[in-house]
Amino acid sequence: MKKILSVEYLLLFCYFLFKCFYLLPSGLLQIFDLFFIICFSLMSIRQKLVWNNPFLVRYSFFLIYVSIVNLYWTLFFPLDYSHLINIMYYVYNAFFLWVNISLIELNYVKYRKAVLSAICVSVVSNIMFIILGVGKIVGNRAVIFFNDPNQMGFFFFMLSMIYFFLKGRNIVIYLSLFVLVLSSASRGCLISICLFYFFLIIFFYYKSSLIRALKYTFTSIVLIMVLGFVFSNKLIYQYEYLNNRLEENSDDDSVMSRGWHRLYEFTDKCVLGYGEGGNKQFKYGEDDLETHSTWANLILSYGIVGLGLFCFVVQCYRKNIFSYILLSPLFLHGIIQVDSRQTTFWLVIFLSGYTFQNNFARRI
């Protein structure tokens, strides 16, 4: 592998670059996931996949339990395939982690270059789409090529975390990612990215010298003024719209709509879990929707046992308090959204631990 960028890393670059183009109604798998599938196939043929990674081992235990619980409940609802479909999502995430971890351990420099380059190109492209009015808009919320604004907000929130954990230093990219999340007007993502950036500011100042800290501060102020001038009208409208959304008491934010009430109404299911599926076992009539929270969904679907295994996965590599603190915005977002089936969700959890374990963060 003497080339600057081998085929596998190029395919991964394409995956992250085109992942924001949603052509299918599902938010999880899209046509451009073919880049990843081809990458996995090539690595399998060339026998480049790493087998003995501790994070993969821990995730495998979680995956096995997820599969057992969902297969068990499939027996009670044989005509409902949602439990089996959810197993496939976690299996797909396992393969995604397998490829990314293997590429990192084969050549971290190439991996970092491929992913950071894809993020930069993606961010610049989507900023231009918004400026030129390309893509969809729902009300006053930008969607671009996603299916809904929340998908867009979560995607760029995840990119901001991945960019940091891979030692991305470009302040323009950080501010542009914030603008993209703001454009989506996703309240959960905006609160989470604000908290994440607050921790980043503390982290950068803690790790930097005085001269470097002043440089970051001056550069940030200048860039904020420039972005504010370019997007002045859009930001004013977006602020007013977002302020109205935060003030309104919509049913979408209620405990009932998120499914948290099921924790005390179905406490007998909170030990081993009732499976992640169509929720027909609730017998609520029309209220058979998914529990709309990562944490509530984990407890109800896989019980205390599943939650314990999830925490067992998260704990891997973590010996530094910063790795937990910087990951907390992701878990905050999980209070009101189901993120655990997303590939980037698991990648961020891995990178946040792996980065500090290998002291990459000290050199930011």
Image (tube, grey):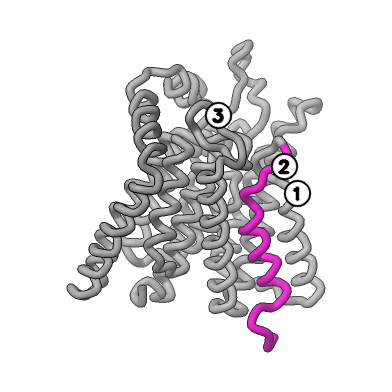
Instruction: Tell us which disc is closer to us: 1 or 3.
Output: 3
Label 2: few (<14), some (14–19) or many (≥20) C-alpha neighbours in 10 Å: some
Q: Where residue 42 sits in the image (x, y, percent)? A: 78, 70
Task: Give the Cα distance between marks 1 and 2.
Answer: 7 Å
- Marked residue nearer the N-terminal end (1 or 2): 2
The answer to which image quadrant residue 15 occupies is: bottom right
Categorize mark 1 by other alpha carbons within 10 Å: few (<14), some (14-19), many (20+).
Answer: few
Q: Residues within 10 Å of mark 3 (few under 14, many from 20)?
A: few
Residue found 64% across the figure and 21% down from its top:
281
Mark 1–mark 2 contact, CB under 8 Å?
Answer: yes
* Mark identifier at residue 138: 3
The three-letter amino acid code for the residue at tag 1 is: Ile
* Relative height, residue 193 to residue 116 (above, below): above
Numbered disc 1: secondary structure? helix
Residue 256 rendering spot, x and y as whole percentages = 47, 19
Where in the figure is residue 302, as x and y percent of width and height? 57, 38
- Residue depicted at x 56% and y 40%: 133
Q: Which mark is residue 23?
A: 2
Q: Looking at the image, which is closer to me, 132 or 67? A: 132
Residue that extends furthest to the left in the rendered view of this protein:
210
- Magenta-span inclusion, residue 22: yes
* SS state under label 2: loop
Q: Nearer the viewer, residue 119 or 134?
A: 134
Of the numbered discs 1 and 3, the one sitting upstream in the chain is 1
Q: Gap between marks 3 and 2, in whole Å?
A: 17 Å
- Which of disc 2 and disc 3 is earlier in sequence? 2
* Residue type for callout 2: Leu
The residue wearing badge 1 is 31
Locate residue 81, reporting x and y percent. 77, 32
Q: State the extent of the magenta-drawn residues as a range.
A: 1-24
Residue in view at x 37 percent, y 71 percent = 361
